[in-house]
Image (cartoon, coloured by chain):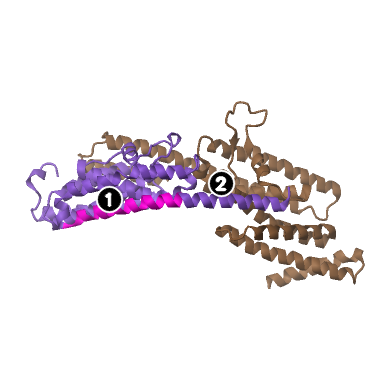
Amino acid sequence: MDIAAAFSTYSSCVEREAELREGVQGAVRELEKTSYAITTTLEKMHNTQGIQNIETICRECHEELSKVPALYQALQDKVPPGEFYRYHHNFRGTTHRLVAATCLITYLEENSLPMHEEVAKSLGLCTQRDQGFHLDLEDYLQGTLSISHELSRLAINSVTAGDYSRPFQIRQFLRDLHAAYSLLFPKNELRKKFDELKYSLKKTEEVVYNLSLRGLKPQEMETSG
Amino acid sequence: MAELQEASLKSECKGSKQLPDICQDSQLMMKFREYSKMLDEKNDKHERIYKTSRDVTVRSKRVIFTLHRIPGVAEDVKENLLSSAASELRAIEQTLMKHIAMELRDEEPHQFVNAYTAGIQEYVEALSFHYFLMTGTIISHSETQKRVTFGAEAGDQIDVVPLSVLLQPKEYILGIADLTGELMRFCIKCVSTGDFDKCYKICDILKTMHGGFLSLGYIPAKELYHKMVVFKSSLHKVEEACYSLQLRKSEVPAEMLSDVFAMYDADENHAHYI
């Protein structure tokens, strides 16, 4: 084996990979744009008017979200089959953001957490690696955990807007979420995010405490809260 | 780990005591139990591959040390060392590498590449070092990949899909970059034991490799950049050694040269430590 040949083989491999990576990054940029648009729309819910118009905000988000499956399809076309994890870090953050947005919208509409399969389906992905482009379980868990921060903010802001019952709902939801995540044995990044959930829960509990202390607990919550 | 699990278990118990409204059998909880299992499986696999990879590193290093004993020994001892290194390399492939390959079966290797990259680089280094001593040139990427691909052999007919550890070009080239350091050490030792032909030969090979690395142009990999800096200093050292060798040849009879260089080498080391 000629030494020069070994190096030229490697150099052509590097070139091929750089080309592929560029294609992937292009597709990810499109996806990123949409994900930021959705996050921006969701940010409106923290405004005083936003809290009263949550349905409208969700509708707007759905419109943006409906573009996502096609964008993931475009990304999938760029990623060679069987090399999902080679490019995973390129689109990981965007996926987290989209999962978080989906979870938040579902929570606002249905007051429940969508499961791995449901989120994957709404993003146009599948859950198993062998079925094609998939939503990695860890990405789902990471994305889901990021909504806790948004929800604790929403609890505070809804009090400001005069909605006293929402913090009670949010506390209940975060408690359920915390109980569910306690079943996991998280590592690294997931562990940090899990700590964030605890702080969000604590913050929300403080809001609830302050409301209860001042007798601002809504009547219909009396039995359940 | 057990402690942590216990703590989380405890907090869960406490939670359920305080909050009777959390249903342990809700869909959420059931699903998360499933997720927990899947997450643990993945993390365990990562851990197992990582452990095996560390064993690969240790044993590959041993092979390299064995090979470094070659300069200055008799021909039959040399043969012995080479063959024992070869059989050790075989053993690494057949046990540890095969183990990693089994773990990677039905998985996407890129997901776990970080767990075994260090081990496989060290292995490439050992393998290419041995290959160099046998043949005088460097092993190709495809040949290296073949060494860690199993199942294509006659004995393993059960495996429909060939079992292999993915060896990315990146790991191969990083291993080769490490090889340069070993060659430098080998070359310097050859000088002090009087095997001058080998010394010139290694110097030539290193120069060719240096040209090869330069031909790659700018490579956006931090690891390779650091290895290049090290390589440049080893190349410099080898060039200096060859230069002095040539100079002294003219002033000292050949049979005395090796003694002179033993002294020179000690001086060099001494200066290095100061």
Indicate the position of residue B258 as horizontal and vertical percent values: 86, 64
A172 or B239, which is in the foreground? Answer: B239
Q: Can you identify the residue that label 1 sits on? A: A148
Q: Can you identify the residue that label 2 sits on? A: B116
Q: Are marks 2 and 1 in contact (CB under 8 Å)?
A: no
Residue B213 badge? none
Rendering quarter of residue B253: bottom right
From this view, report whether residue B3 is shown above or below residue B205: above
Check the picture and name the quadrant holding the C terminus of chain A: top left
SS class, disc 1 = helix
What is the number of callouts on the image?
Answer: 2
Indicate the position of residue B274 as horizontal and vertical percent values: 68, 73
Label 2 chain ID: B
Q: Residue at x 15, y 57 (%)?
A: A48
**Amino acid type of disc 2?**
Tyr
Indicate the position of residue B42 as horizontal and vertical percent values: 45, 40
Residues shaded magenta: A24-47
Cα–Cα span, label 2 and label 1: 35 Å
B136 or A214, which is in the foreground? Answer: B136
Chain that is coloured brown in the picture? B
Q: Residue at x 65, y 56 (%)?
A: B177
SS class, disc 2 = helix
| Residue A46 drawn in magenta | yes
* Position of residue A1 in the picture relative to residue A80 (left or right): right
B219 or B64, which is in the foreground? Answer: B219
Rendering quarter of residue B242: bottom right
| Residue A206 drawn in magenta | no
**Amino acid type of disc 1?**
Ser
Chain that is coloured purple in the picture? A
